[in-house]
Image: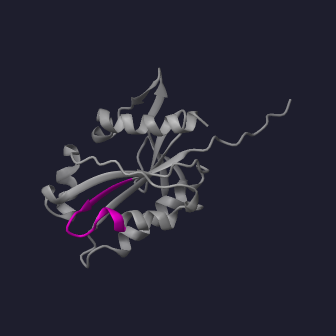
């Protein structure tokens, strides 16, 4: 018997944005993300704030400026999209980071893109590592959470800030949007 190939389920994409409030405001960044999303007239972006992300403050402040001026928020597109867009979205965000970098090549903001699926949460990254699977064009898929027992389960490599309960609740709300379709 021949095995039938199945298309993967669609996903909800999200973007994690860290920026220096003296360089950008959330509306400028939201407009950039809106330019990226196909069929953007079909829905709006949502933007919960996560003002504390202590594990990463010192890492990003070296490049972007004082810890007290860094802000972070997540946005998502409420309509499901094809997960094949992960590489496209990551390549575009890398390009934006380069275009808006300072003359010394330091970034003025950081945008990570990922998706929530019924069974997992995946981030796109340009950094290879043992648990990251190469997709294409220098982009890797980083499995952040698996979904088991009605909750997200972190993995040994899951970033500490992603393990904060408020963020897990946000991602669970995105998963609920998929499950209700």
Residue 18 lies in magenta, yes or no?
A: yes
In the figure, residue 61 lies in which quadrant? Answer: bottom left
What residue range appears in magenta?
A: 16-28
Name of the residue lying farthest toward the top:
149
Q: Is residue 162 above or below residue 150?
A: below
Drawn side of residue 166 relative to residue 115, left or right: left
- In the current view of this chain or complex, which residue is farthest to the right? 1
18 is higher (above) or lower (below) than 174: below
User: Residue 143, how many percent across, how many down?
Assistant: 46, 40
| Residue occupying the point 26% across, 75% down | 102
Label count reads 0
Q: Quadrant of the C terminus?
A: top right
Could one spot residue 138 in this view of the protein? Answer: no
Residue 79, horizontal then vertical, whole percent: 56, 49
Q: Is 175 on the left-hand or right-hand side of 82?
A: left
Closer-to-camera residue (131/111): 111
Residue placed at 37% from the left, 75% from the top? 99
- 163 lies above or below 75: above
- Relative image position of residue 73 (x, y in whole percent): 32, 52
> Which sits in the foreground, 155 or 81?
81
Residue 146 seen in the figure: yes
Does the magenta portion include 26? yes
Colouring scheme applied when the structure was drawn: one colour
Left/right of residue 71 with respect to residue 6 in the rendered view: left
For the N terminus, give its image quadrant. Answer: top right
Residue at 40% across, 70% down: 96
Q: Position of residue 39 (x, y in %)?
A: 60, 61
On screen, 120 above or below 141?
above
């Amino acid at each position: 018997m021949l095995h039938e190939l199945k298309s993967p389920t669609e996903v909800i994409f999200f973007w994690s944005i860290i920026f220096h409030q003296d360089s950008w405001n959330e509306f400028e960044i939201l407009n950039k993300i809106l330019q990226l999303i196909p069929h953007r007239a079909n829905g709006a972006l949502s933007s919960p704030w996560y003002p504390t992300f202590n594990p990463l403050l010192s890492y990003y402040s070296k490049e972007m400026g004082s810890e007290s001026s860094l802000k972070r928020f997540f946005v998502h597109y409420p309509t499901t999209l094809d997960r094949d867009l992960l590489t496209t979205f990551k390549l575009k965000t890398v390009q934006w980071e380069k275009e808006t970098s300072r003359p010394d090549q330091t970034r003025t903001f950081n945008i990570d893109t990922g998706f929530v699926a019924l069974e997992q949460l995946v981030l796109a990254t340009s950094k290879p590592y043992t648990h990251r699977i190469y997709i294409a064009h220098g982009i890797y898929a980083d499995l952040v959470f698996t979904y088991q027992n009605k909750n997200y389960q972190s993995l040994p490599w899951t970033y500490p800030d992603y393990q904060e309960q408020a963020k897990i609740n946000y991602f669970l709300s995105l998963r609920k949007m998929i499950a209700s379709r």
